[in-house]
Image: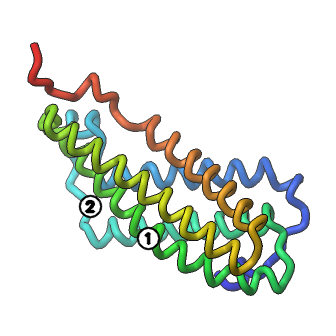
Amino acid sequence: MERLETELVTNTHNNTNENLASMKNLAHCLIAAAFLALGSATTFAQATPPPQEPDDLRATLETLRSDVNAFKIRTLNQALQMTGPEAEKFWPVYRQYEKELAAVADRKIALLREFGERCANGTLDDKAADAMAKQWLKNVQGRLDLWKKYQKKIAKAVSPARAAQFLQVEHQMALFMDLNIAAEMPALRAVIKTGKP
């Protein structure tokens, strides 16, 4: 990890397609892991395989998270192309950010797990959907609050321009992951039980 943080990549143009392919592969792995954690409605509707042990699942998710973090570090190195002194100031702040981001991601995974379970067992009603929507918005706000917090910290530690670059990269990665997860989720119209006729 330390080696990746201090490595400055100079040839970003040639690596763009390779990085996009790597990011897609990591996204697909994370989606698969998320669905191992929560199961999809179609999977549960069919014969359900024996559930994976929670410790095994946690280890799988942590391995995937580590892979994503390594990819993000490479991408940030390529995008920011920091000097040595900038990198020395940036990476300790970034490590703090990643620790806090992991907590936000854990809450999102728990929410996705609940959604998958409710879809699978037919308990996604109006009340549950409303509560889950509020939790989802709270999670999105938590990520925004974290970005605001660390934009200020990076601007102070390194520079406002580097903080803006950091936000741009984080936002793009988050959009990519969110779109991939959303594409795999069942549509609410197909699973929700409303109280209305």
Q: Quadrant of residue 195?
A: top left
User: Which dot marks residue 148?
Assistant: none
For the N terminus, the image quarter is bottom right
Taking 54 as reference, is 153 left or right? right
Q: Residue at 64%, 53% (x, y): give it.
A: 23
Q: Tell me where residue 72 appears, x and y as whole percent.
A: 65, 64
Q: How far is disc 2 from disc 1 in space, using C-alphas?
A: 15 Å
State the residue position of label 1. 62
Q: Residue at 33%, 60% (x, y): give it.
A: 107
Under mark 1, the amino acid is: Glu
For the C terminus, the image quarter is top left
Taking 121 as reference, is 63 left or right? right
Nearer to us in this view, 6 or 169: 169
State the residue position of label 2. 52
Provide the secondary structure element on which disc 1 rests: helix
Q: Residue at 64%, 49% (x, y): give it.
A: 172
Q: Nearer the viewer, mark 2 or mark 1?
A: 1
